[in-house]
């Protein structure tokens, strides 16, 4: 497979010149303001909580090969809150990704770093369903507290923190790119699981959107 080297990630953004295709968010979203002390105190958001404000996904295919996915908006729940977002079939099976960027982003398409938003982790997985584990192993997998894992992942990409200090590039570190002629081929559809944390000292009216950008 021939992989064409994309334009620099520095030149890429969350903007769309060709027009967005918008639909209601098809993934899962929840938040937890007490996660430091109670990792079970999650509150469901849209779409499982139909009374919550709706969340949307917007897609765009930009000139030069970039594909853009933006998810949001999400409401702030106060300093220190963790927001967990999951979505299936972000990258189709068979695609070869030469570069990618996963980051909070403003409505104007500018990357947002910490503060005010920290990236706890971003996982790109080949599957996330506990039912696949039950069928494969005959029992659900348990964590050290006896609770059921919500997925048994096969890692395609794994990032914790993601942001460098200012001297090393700041939010520009929230990317992956391969040397010319190389890329990562996904033999199965890629799903995304990520968590964002509102900075403890910040007070926000609304969270930035989530940007997933790949080539």
Image: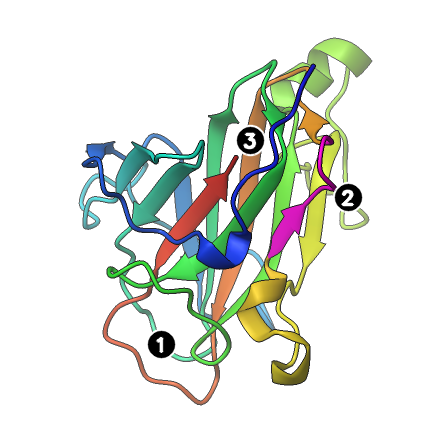
Observer-side mark, 3 or 1, equals 3
Cα–Cα span, label 3 and label 1: 28 Å
Q: Is residue 161 above or below residue 133?
A: below
Q: Secondary structure at mark 1?
A: loop
Residue plotted at (70% across, 31% down) = 183
Say which of marks 2 and 3 sits in front: 3
Estimate the x, y position of residue 210 in percent, counting from the top left.
40, 52
Label whose residue precedes the other's in the sequence (3 or 1): 1
Magenta stretch mostly in which secondary structure? loop
Query: Is residue 153 visible to the viewer in this orientation of the structure?
Result: no
Please tell me which residue lies in front, 183 or 87: 183
Task: Quote the CA–CA distance across marks 1 and 2.
Answer: 29 Å
- From the viewer's perspective, is residue 126 above or below residue 64? above
Rendering quarter of residue 124: top right
In the depicted view, which residue is nearer to us: 162 or 191? 162
Q: Which residue is mark 2?
A: 143
Residue 25: x %, y % from top left: 30, 35
- Identified at 65% across, 65% down, the residue is 161
Residue range highlighted in magenta: 175-182
- Categorize mark 2 by other alpha carbons within 10 Å: few (<14), some (14-19), many (20+): few
Q: Is residue 91 above or below residue 169?
A: above
Mark number displayed over residue 191: 3
Distance of mark 2 from mark 3, alpha carbons? 21 Å
Q: Residues within 10 Å of mark 3 (few under 14, many from 20)?
A: many
**Image x and y of residue 85, in percent:** 46, 46
**Residue 116 or residue 63, whichever sits in front:** 63
Q: Earlier in the sequence, mark 2 or mark 3?
A: 2
Q: Is residue 205 left or right of residue 13?
A: left
Q: Secondary structure at mark 2?
A: loop
Badge 1 is on which residue? 78
Quadrant (top left/top right/bottom left/bottom right) for the N terminus: top right
């Amino acid at each position: 497979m021939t992989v064409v080297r994309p334009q620099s990630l520095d030149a890429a953004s969350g903007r769309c010149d060709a027009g967005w295709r918008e639909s209601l968010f098809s993934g899962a979203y929840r938040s937890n303001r007490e996660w430091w002390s109670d990792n079970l105190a999650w509150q469901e958001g849209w779409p499982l909580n139909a009374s919550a404000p709706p969340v949307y996904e917007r897609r765009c295919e930009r000139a030069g090969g970039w594909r853009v996915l933006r998810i949001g908006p999400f409401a702030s729940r106060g300093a220190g809150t963790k927001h967990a977002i999951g979505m299936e079939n972000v990258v189709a099976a068979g695609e070869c990704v030469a570069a990618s960027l996963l980051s909070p982003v403003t409505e104007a398409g500018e990357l947002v770093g910490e503060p005010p938003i920290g990236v706890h982790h971003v996982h790109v997985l080949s599957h996330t369903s506990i039912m696949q584990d039950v069928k494969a192993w005959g029992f659900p997998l348990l964590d050290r507290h006896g609770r059921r894992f919500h997925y048994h992942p096969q890692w395609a990409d794994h990032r914790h923190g993601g942001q460098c200090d200012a001297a090393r590039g700041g939010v520009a570190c929230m990317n992956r790119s391969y040397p010319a002629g190389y890329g990562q081929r996904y033999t199965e559809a890629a799903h995304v699981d990520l968590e964002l944390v509102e900075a403890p000292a910040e007070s926000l009216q609304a969270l930035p959107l989530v940007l997933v950008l790949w080539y």
